[in-house]
Amino acid sequence: QKALEENKIKMPLQAAAEYFIDSWFENHFKEEKLLTLKDNYVLVEMSYQNAPLNIYKTIFEIQLAGYIPVLAHPERYVFYHNAFSEYEKLKNAGCVFQLNLLSTVDYYGSKIGKIADELLAKGMYTFCGTDVHHKKHIEAFDEKVKIKNIDSLKEIIANNQFFKF
């Protein structure tokens, strides 16, 4: 913010974080205020290998602490692909889903894109975002969107207006 002001650039800036659900996080949110997307919406992710053993307990405790968990890129958790009911359990437990837009162009492969499309079709997403860690991520948006549920995608993109400040 200071650098923006020094360069006479008027642009609002806020800090947020994506938290990895592990034992450190389980203690951290009980002791310190989290960097949220907005209000009490906190972005969380988990391992791509397997879900934390106590995922539902953690989700409940996040909510008890006053936060709404926003699960980043649920389409990328391959251990749920053959157990689609787990997505529904996560939603019923109070998780909000955030689509990674890179999944819509098959950046992570067509299987991930297919799951993203299926989650879109079922109305599971609320918001969208993306990982932009390097130039290849940005260049991937030159690719054609491969998903079929374009209207649902437009809807969740519009939902992102919620985060406007």
Image: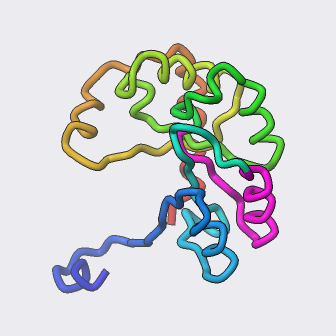
Residue 128: percent from the left, percent from the top? 52, 42
Extreme residue toward the left, this view = 7
Residue 11: percent from the left, percent from the top? 33, 71
Which stretch did the figure color magenta? 54-73
Q: How is the image coloured?
A: rainbow
Residue 83: percent from the left, percent from the top? 71, 23
Instruction: Please tell me whether residue 5 is drawn above or below residue 16 in the rendered image.
Output: below
Q: Foreground residue, 159 or 48?
A: 48
- Quarter of the image for residue 81 reads top right
Q: Which residue is drawn at 53% across and 72% down?
A: 35
Q: Foreground residue, 55 or 37?
A: 55
- Does the magenta portion include 98? no
Q: Residue at x 58, y 55 (%)?
A: 44
Instruction: Please tell me whether residue 138 is drawn above or below residue 60 in the rendered image.
Output: above
- Does the magenta portion include 69? yes
Q: Is residue 60 left or right of residue 40?
A: right
Give the mark count: 0
Q: Residue at x 60, y 55 (%)?
A: 162
Q: Foreground residue, 10 or 92?
A: 92
Q: In this view, does 160 lie to the left or right of 62?
A: left
Q: Residue at x 53, y 57 (%)?
A: 20
Position of the N terminus by quadrant: bottom left
Q: Foreground residue, 53 or 115?
A: 53
Q: In this view, does 144 lie to the left or right of 68?
A: left
Residue 155: percent from the left, percent from the top? 60, 34
